[in-house]
Amino acid sequence: MQTSPLIWDDIERLSDLYRKTAGTAINATQFSLYAITHHSTKIEGSTLTLEETNALLEKGSSIGGKPIDHQNMVLDHQEALEFVLDQAAKRRTFSVTLLQEIAAKVMRRTGKTVSSVLGTTDETKGDFRKVPVTAGGHYFVDAAKIPSLVERLVDQINQRLDQPRSTEEILRLSFTAHFDLVSIHPFTDGNGRTSRLVMNYIQAYHQQPLTLVNAADRAAYISAITQSREQENLEPFIQFMAAQHTKELSAQIEAYDKSKTTGERKSASEGFSMIF
């Protein structure tokens, strides 16, 4: 299965349009980041709605009736996302240390200490796991292999990080890094969130719009990962992620257009602009 060339043409067109529209609105950009946090944490079990996530991040006040761990997961992810974007803006070289710093921020409030015969793992420090893990009946690599596998992945990312030129090349690299990291599963918890943040780091490094995996598509997302793993072929996952990227760009552009129209109407009737 090969990703249709047409979807990359669509992404190129939408990316250019996004930069001229929704990407120029400060509030729109901020709420886009909140949306990334909302969907990434909801995929991992957060029960906060998008409105509750926005309120928590905007006002900093806790949400009554929702588990504190879910709220802390949201706060941790937002701080990790802001850290990722800052490091990408500084064009910091990707490294094992940077990966573990991202993972540590993802688990800063909710992480725990995990002990085994092989030693102790502190999730709040981004330690690699020392225990076997499974998910959906799949057994991930032996803990002893994680350091070398992560080193190899980091080297592969760095070899290509400054090479991609087209939008397709940049997104393929980011999606591949996402898939490879979540397949290694180097941490006891937070692997999905960290893998999606590494994807966003690569995109931000190249000043591309960020990809969001919609929580409503969680089953299809897991299916795409499983399919690519079983077929030993990245294309099912690449195709899914490219479709997600297209859908989110379209949604943000549409929201911007609607908001702009509403703002222009209010400006005409009330004497001020309310664009985003």
Image: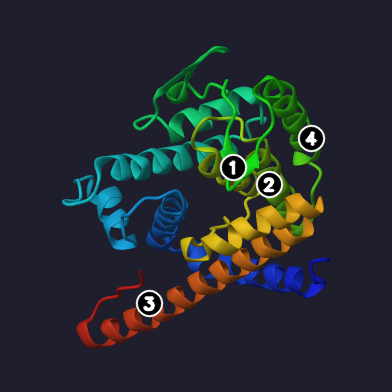
| Residue denoted by label 1 | 195
**Which numbered tag is attached to residue 156?**
4
Observer-nearest of 109 and 14? 109
Task: Report how far apart the C-alphas of labels 3 and 1 lie in the structure.
Answer: 32 Å
* Occupied quadrant, residue 158: top right
Task: Report how far apart the C-alphas of labels 3 and 4 lie in the structure.
Answer: 42 Å
Q: Residues within 10 Å of mark 2 (few under 14, many from 20)?
A: many
| Residue denoted by label 3 | 259
| Residue denoted by label 2 | 179
Q: Residues within 10 Å of mark 4 (few under 14, many from 20)?
A: few
Residue, far front: 137
- Amino acid type at circle 3 is Ser
- Amino acid type at circle 1 is Ser
Q: Nearer the viewer, mark 3 or mark 2?
A: 2
Task: Report how far apart the C-alphas of labels 4 and 2 lie in the structure.
Answer: 13 Å
* Residue 59 coordinates in the image, percent (x, y): 22, 49
* Residue 5 coordinates in the image, percent (x, y): 81, 71
Q: Nearer the viewer, mark 3 or mark 1?
A: 1
Considering only order in the chain, which callout, 4 or 3, is on the residue closer to the N terminus?
Answer: 4
Do the numbered discs 3 and 4 sit on residues whose CB atoms are within 8 Å? no
Secondary structure at numbered mark 3: helix
Residue at screen point 68% across, 19% down: 144
